[in-house]
Amino acid sequence: MAFNAGQQNQQADQTANFFWLIVLIIGSFLVLWWLDKKFVVMPIFWFRYYEIDFLQWLATTVWIPAATFLHLPLPLPDLHALSSLKNFIGTTDPAHATWKNFATINVLIGHWTRYLVMSILLILSAASYFRSGAHFHHTYSMKTLRVVNEEMWPQIRPIADINLMKEDIDEGVWAMARTPLLFCKEHNLLSVTTTAGKKVWVVNQKASYRLITLQVGSLWTGLDALPIHVKAIALIFLARAMSQRPLSNRIIVQLAASASSGQLDFSTISDELKKFYKTPVITFLEKRHAYVLTFMASLLEIARGDGVLGCAEFLWLKAVDRRLWYMLSNVGRPASFVEVAGAYSHWQAEKKIGRALKTPIVKGAVDALTESLQNILYVDEGEQWRTTSAG
């Protein structure tokens, strides 16, 4: 709904911009006429003068001979009237032209040029129609479309040979993000109690607190101690942060292209990363983040200062490190995925305080999980066929 509203607002803005452009043009025209009409009359009279020349030539060489030969009842231009208009334009002082004369000349000439303009527009419309139609002579399936686009978008290669439509959306490395209810069921965090005659979900606070604390992950101990796939992501972000976009793009393509083979190409990552060990960005973030996930999330924020950098650029990461993938996917979002709620909560705390915190701050995540479960209707397995509106 928010997306649709955004599109409607954008369309409304464009319509308003076009309207104000028309108002500006008309307003400028009227102001120029009021200040000194010759600045309006001179260019238009000049254009109309040569327009009449063209109409006279077209009438004598094409229009009249064709109509006479084909015995067509075409409206024939009055050459004498056109000559009179041409003479009037050539002899009238632009500074003393009246609005009535100015408007009448434009109307009379426009009466004949409309046929020419209509013919040109019809020809252009036909050319546009048949030419555009020639572009659409290939029929693609989702599979063949992926193959065609791999050269332009190598980032899609990790899933190019996988039919995700046939995959279970809740199973495997490409499974969608867990919902709060499914997450709690998988980790045995739920129980059921009866309140006011209705069964409701209850979250095990101690177990959920322990599990969400584990989501914060490992402590930050430096770039050199990172796993190679995290080094690769850090290199992409640091290159963007230091305005080295070509290097960042090269690493993105290198990893995406190798992902389809099942063996990621990390051959140059460590050597390239050494160039960034002492950059101000690293020093800045190490003082503000104590964990790898929170460090990487803020590094992505800084990297986006160089431009758009979506997580789809390193799609392979979801299959390699699901937690890091969802943590980075959370950057810029107002709410967290439940799978990284603990890391997200701690990240927000570190950002607010402005320094690294080694003690996990996850109470907000636990409270949010509890609240979300309270808003989910409990339905017995034997009653799942009923809708929530059935009573």
Image (cartoon, rainbow, N blue to C red):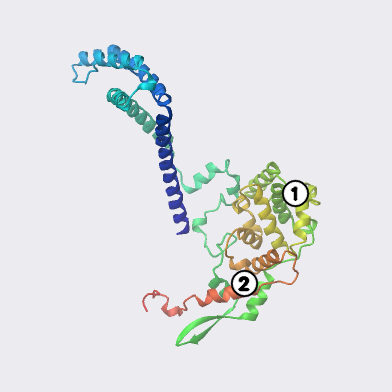
- Other-residue count near label 1 (Cα within 10 Å), few / some / many at <14 / 14–19 / ≥20: some
> Which image quadrant: the N terminus?
bottom left
Q: Which residue is mark 2?
A: 365
Where is 297 relative to 342, above or below?
Answer: above
Label 2 element class: helix
Percent of width and height locating residue 334: 57, 63
Where is 100 relative to 156, above or below?
Answer: above
Q: Which residue is mark 1?
A: 269
Label 1 element class: helix
Residue 274 lies left or right of residue 369; in this view the side is right
Percent of width and height locating residue 98: 33, 25
Name which quarter of the figure residue 206 lies in: bottom right
Identified by mark 2, the residue type is: Ala
Q: What residue do we see at 52% from left, 56% from top?
A: 164
**Viewer-nearest residue: 169 or 108:** 108
**Viewer-nearest residue: 287 or 213:** 287
Percent of width and height locating residue 191: 55, 82
Identified by mark 1, the residue type is: Ile
Tell me the CA gap for discs 1 and 2: 34 Å
Q: What residue do we see at 81% from left, 51% from top?
A: 278
Name which quarter of the figure residue 317 lies in: bottom right
Question: Total number of numbered labels?
Answer: 2
